Image (spheres, rainbow, N blue to C red):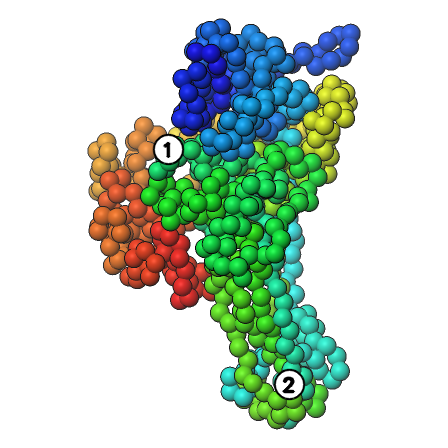
Amino acid sequence: MKNLIIVESPAKARTITNFLGKEYKVIASKGHIRDLPKSSFGITIDEESGDFIPKYSIPREANPTVKELKKLAKAAETVYIATDEDREGEAIGYHIAKAIGKEPSELPRIVFHEITKTAIKRALDNPRSVNMDSVDAQQTRRLLDRIVGYKLSPLLASKIQRGLSAGRVQSSTLKIVIDREREIKAFKPVEYWSIDALFQKNIESSIYSFDGNKIDKMTLGNETSASQIVNSAKAESFIVTSIETTKRKSKTPPPFMTSTLQQSASTQLGFSPKKTMMVAQKLYEGVKTDKGTMGVITYMRTDSLSLAKEAISSAREFIKNEFGNKYLPSKAKNYTTKSKGAQEAHEAIRPTIVEFTPQIAQKHLGADELKLYRLIYNRFLACQMTEAEFETQAILFEGEKSIFKASGRRMLFDGFYKVTGYTEKDKLLPKLNKGQKVSLDDIKAEQHFTEPPPRYNEASLIKKLESLGIGRPSTYAPTVTTLQARKYVELEKKRIHLTEIAFTVIEMLEKHFPDIVDSGFTANMEETLDMVAEGEKNWQDILKKFYAPFMERIDKGKREIKSLKQATPTGESCPKCEAELLLRKGRYGEFIACSNFPKCKYTKNIDGTESDQPEETDEKCDKCGSAMVIKDSRRGKFLACSSYPKCKNAKSLIPPRELTVPCPLCGGKIQEREGKRGVFFGCASYPKCKFISNFEPIDKKCPECDYTMGKKTLSDKDLYECLKCKHRIDA
């Protein structure tokens, strides 16, 4: 063996091995093999210089890997570092070199945005050194997060409750969710009225102006003003005073970067950001195709919108051959990233080979992989196609005092919608002449109230983080996942709901550590880290500037922050063990509990009523044979094993609804079920059959692939969508 190539992932190693000869050995580090210790702070401060010295160690589970890497590196003539080309990948490469006893600057570093034979060979022909500025930027992030996490989390645990945590990005993100909840609670609905009319029996229109004053959404604030217009219009005669027809173009969408891919996968596919990145990782690292195993998309952690010239050329050639010249713009389209510090990678997310179409990919990819690949593939093609063209129509119907406006629209040319799909129907207005008299056949006023801003879902929260400059492509999904893991938020019907403890934590941080939850401070820190990566700032100076004042507030907080953990004695005795009863705070408010907890688990509500005890049933647990009991949860009553927590068997109290449509995979029955993210539909034969759908399957076959279709609502329109190829038709 002459050459050793070290990557992070075994899947990535297998794919690259396929492209190289016997003179190369490709091995995976399996992620981080050297990091700050989990059991201690892991940072010392030099007494003379004040510099921060991280104490990196090799985790026990990584020892066998490191041992093998050292052995192979010793036998190799050349050792290549081939980790991902973002800051985390650069840092992993640095630590791999240190772990195997090599100087990072002496090892050739190869980078590539796609795992294809051409890209790998080009990278081997153009090695560089480990970028120490990027390593320092990632190291600064790691140490900042360790300082905040290890110093602030214990303070929260001591003052509020055990198990709480805080983080530089995590806490500012939670503050954003809290602020939205406060907006919702403080919101006061405002009344307004709309007026719609029907002319010539079928022309829908809305009030445009009255008595010379233009009417907008909030003009009509009560029934009296709305009734005045309605009564006046009924007595008026109307003619057509204006007919306007204009053409406009719909711009092509840019290719995906990490944040927009996560948002689109959430809204269109129902994927969580975490799932999106897991599936994208598989597509990037390599899948089996007719041409062998290869990566079918470029690197998926990126905030760049640029595309390689070769990729654009191949896309334009494909569009010309597949759809014709009318779908091909005269010049190639280039996109630029608006966000500051967009430098995590050099390309947007795109397919590596444009000839590997979703139709071909269908033979090689799993269901989720195909869905995400089709989304990425179609967006990439669309970004290099011509714009869609529409004709908009506007007609004004004028009476003595009232003017109504009717609007229409029709597609003249589908352009990029040829590949992304277009579900809206044309709304055509009949041919009328200026000055023509028209009849008012119906008019109605309707009351409305303004609505509060919606709670965030995972996609809209990531969009907010991106707009504020909080985090980077590699941190969006982990940040949202961390908030759920820490029990600060819960997902209900795909919306983010806060737990009680989240408010308590943020209120304390707002008062005593305002910069930690300030989005501006967090965004500025990201820009500072970008400057470290560019070699414009010294990473030690940043840590010194942050550490001293932060630790002063930690010490002050230990002395002055009032503990919220104390429970208030009630003066009553527990009816079960006679210990004192205490008034405590929980996730859902105050309650009374035995002071002898956890030995005695007696609780009651603050109004004196005892907490509901599980109701026993005659049904036996099909896993352990114990009696099943009826328990209550936020989602309603359910059956659970009485031996919990030894046996965690649980099921719905009400038998699931069965559909008449057979399972498209095995022909069995499909059941409606309730999950953490809401209602879904799955095969009754699970786990033997793993059919699942977020939308209700219907007795209708897809005209494209003859698979079962499902019914869904998109932008308030009912659609039928194929559960396999995603082809849509209007319901």
Q: Quadrant of residue 361?
A: top left
| Residue drawn 62% across the image and 21% down it | 128
Q: Which is nearer the eye, 116 or 623?
A: 116
Kind of residue at disc 1: Gly
Q: CA distance from mark 2 to mark 1?
A: 65 Å
- Pointer 2 residue: 397
| Residue drawn 26% across the image and 55% down it | 658
Kindly check if marks 2 and 1 are in contact, taking CB atoms under 8 A apart as contact: no
Q: Residues within 10 Å of mark 2 (few under 14, many from 20)?
A: many
Q: Which is nearer the eye, 287 or 548?
A: 287
- Pointer 1 residue: 292
Q: Where's the C terminus, which quadrant?
A: bottom left
Q: Give how far across and how far down residue 586 sits, in percent.
A: 52, 36
Vertical relation: 449 (above or below) 13:
below
Helix, strand or loop at mark 2: strand
| Residue drawn 51% across the image and 26% down it | 121
Please report whichever mark, 2 or 1, sits nearer to the chain's N-terminal start.
1
- Can residue 53 be seen from the camera position used here? yes
Q: Which is nearer the eye, 634 or 245?
A: 245
Vertical relation: 243 (above or below) 8:
below
Left or right of 532? Residue 312 is: left
Kind of residue at disc 2: Phe
Specify the label residue 461 is tagged with: none
Mark 2 or 1: the one toward you: 1
